[in-house]
Image (cartoon, coloured by chain):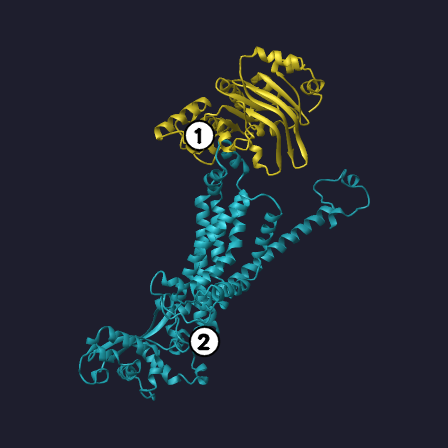
Amino acid sequence: MTDFGATGSHPHELRRGRSLFDLDDRTRRRNRSEGAFRWLGIGAIALSMVFIVILLGTIVARGLPAFTQTTITIEVPLDAAVLDPNGTGDPEVIRSVLTFGYAPLIERGLAGTVAATGVETELTSSQLPQLLSPGVAATLRDMVAADPSLVGQTVQVEALASGRADGYLKGRVTRESLARDTNLSPAHLDVLDALVEQDLARRAFNWDFILGADASESRPEEAGIGVAMIGSFYMMLTVLLLALPIGVAASIYLEEFAPQNRLTDLIEVNISNLAAVPSIVFGILGLAAFIQFAHLPQSAPLVGGLVLTLMTLPTIIISTRAALKAVPPSIRDAALGVGASKMQSVFHHVLPLAMPGILTGLIIGLAQALGETAPLLLIGMVGFIASNPPDGFIDGFVSPNSAMPAQIYEWAKRADPAYYERAWGGIIVLLLFLLVMNVLAVLLRRRFERRW
Amino acid sequence: MFDNRISERRTMTNEIKIRAEGVDVYYGDNHAIKDVSVDISDKMVTAFIGPSGCGKSTFLRCINRMNDTVASARVDGTILLDGEDIYDKRVDPVQLRARVGMVFQKPNPFPKSIYDNVAYGPKIHGMAKNRAELDEIVEKALKRAALWGEVKDRLAAPGTGLSGGQQQRLCIARAVATEPEVLLMDEPCSALDPIATAQVEELIDELRQDYSVVIVTHSMQQAARVSQRTAFFHLGHLVEFDETDRIFTNPTDPRTESYISGRIG
């Protein structure tokens, strides 16, 4: 820029005889541009910091409510006349009662609980259960099926509040917003206020969100990310078991053993190119190769893991090769010089020294795979309602499941604002996992790092 | 001149350890070593001198086939170790390198303990049956490298934590631990200060008792101090090979004279 501009007379003549204390124009101009550049840098960093703060702030503010859930404590009379009309006491008969049969009991129990608070309401007892999740009946039925002797007694149940009642306590649902809502009326909120006052309705930490399974569209209060987390775990396991050995073996061969010729160059270029291929391409490849050709089950974490392995391999190979390249050649010479074979020099000396770099690359690859959604769209892991955890360890690989990012995407698509909140909560869980993995990468790096 | 050399060699009692005949080395299209023939005697220090890029290191690396690791390198001619061609198809370079040890220009200890550095060679060659034997080998090698006294109390300390001179002696200990017959040294003192250099030179002179030592050096004084025979390389040619005293006092070839008197190189 101005650095090389001609100034007319010869610089030596200008400089001679001048005091060091007085800056010439050229120096001043240079200092000015340096200062401007420094401020530009500071500005860029400040701007990115602002964006990060906004991002994290939004995620935390919108996602945190998903980690708490309102429950309403109700006393439910398990009326023998309804559950065991013939008085047989036979557990089989009691178990045969559908969840539908429990609805009137819950209705009665809730009405009783509300009446006990002394609040005046125009709502009929059949309207009150809208405060509760439709899932409560199923919970109650499971409880009785597990212990048929409960029939005839009155049990205290921590019933899940419905998504809207829960939203009211979290500030998501207001009396104004209910004007356009047929599910809940302001009268319900009056009752809810009274229940809160008597500590019968309260918010507690929501373990079910972290450990539980997804639920149907109408029951957001029951949905959790736990089963999707298991799906993600199995996929990561598949990626780890396949991508690490294949990636490291390929890199060692390319870096240490392969002859330097056109074919090797071609392979290298293609690996670099593969790293930039959109992930959805790997998804459709997985659909064609693993599901349509190899007939592996749809929506299975095994297939997801295979697809993500394909996607992660280039990343792992590139970082492993960089780590191997960074080991000084003198170490290889030293090993060969004392009569080690090529393989001994690699496995005894080069690989241990490259370990921190390899592990960092691996974890970055895994983190990338953990957050990947697009390829899962094509193999049926998105939109699948992962309602049951797998039956056993091996079953976990093949039983249909979802994955954390796919689950989040699925929730974000659903209409109920309670699901929107859960999508943000899921993002927090996902980010925590990524944070843990990155911390792990740093720790492993420190642990294995050696100087030479 | 040729007859003269033969008669002189006959006066030496030492056997010939390595015989190179018509060796040519190419790096791709670059003809690095041109028709070099040289006889290296046992229990003697042979120095290779010459200006940078003259091929002396390249030739040294041919003797234990370290050039095999360079994809573009090609070696023609024969190099015999005890009468056997080391470039024969049946020769495994790994086995050869156990008999022809090497010390490099820059000290390159493994980033492991001092003990493990020395024990590595004996371990991979299965030279010790148990820990006690290995301990013995390590101690012997470190003593031979004149390093035992300085490190015997901290064998578990990392080898990279030693000073430059100590590191180089550790590398020499590592090389002699596998009981080689020939020790190749590629400018072993170029990264060391004068005191460490003096120690290593003294060590080289002692190693002559057991090994055939070949040393590449940039320093003519060093060649004069440690070697019995000196080969002068220039532009890939072996210009002159003779008794060290003769090379430095009465060289036959005008190029040798120019080099040792400082006119070229």
Q: Colour of chain B?
A: yellow
Instruction: Say which residue label 2 marks.
Output: A417
What residue does disc 1 label? B118
Q: Residues within 10 Å of mark 2 (few under 14, many from 20)?
A: some
Residue B157 sits in quarter = top left
- Asked whether residue B163 is in view, the answer is no
The residue sitting at the left extreme is A88
Q: Amino acid at mark 1?
A: Val
Looking at the picture, tell me which residue is in the foreground, A220 or B76.
B76
Q: Are marks 1 and 2 on the same chain?
A: no
Residue under the point 23% across and 76% down: A155
**As drawn, A51 above or below B142:** below
> Hey, what amino acid is under mark 2?
Pro
In the drawing, does residue A439 fall left or right of residue A11?
left
Q: Chain of mark 1?
A: B
Instruction: Tell me the tag on residue A292.
Output: none
Q: Closer to the camera: disc 1 or disc 2?
A: 1
All told, the count of numbered labels is 2
Residues under labels 1 and 2: Cα distance?
69 Å
Residue beneath the point at 71% across and 40% down: A20
Q: Position of residue A312 (x, y in %)?
A: 50, 56
Marked residue chain, label 2: A
Q: Is residue A252 left or right of residue A123?
A: right
Q: Residue at x 53, y 18 (%)?
A: B42
- Indicate the secondary structure of the residue bearing disc 2: helix
Q: Position of residue B86 (x, y in %)?
A: 55, 28
Q: Colour of chain A?
A: cyan
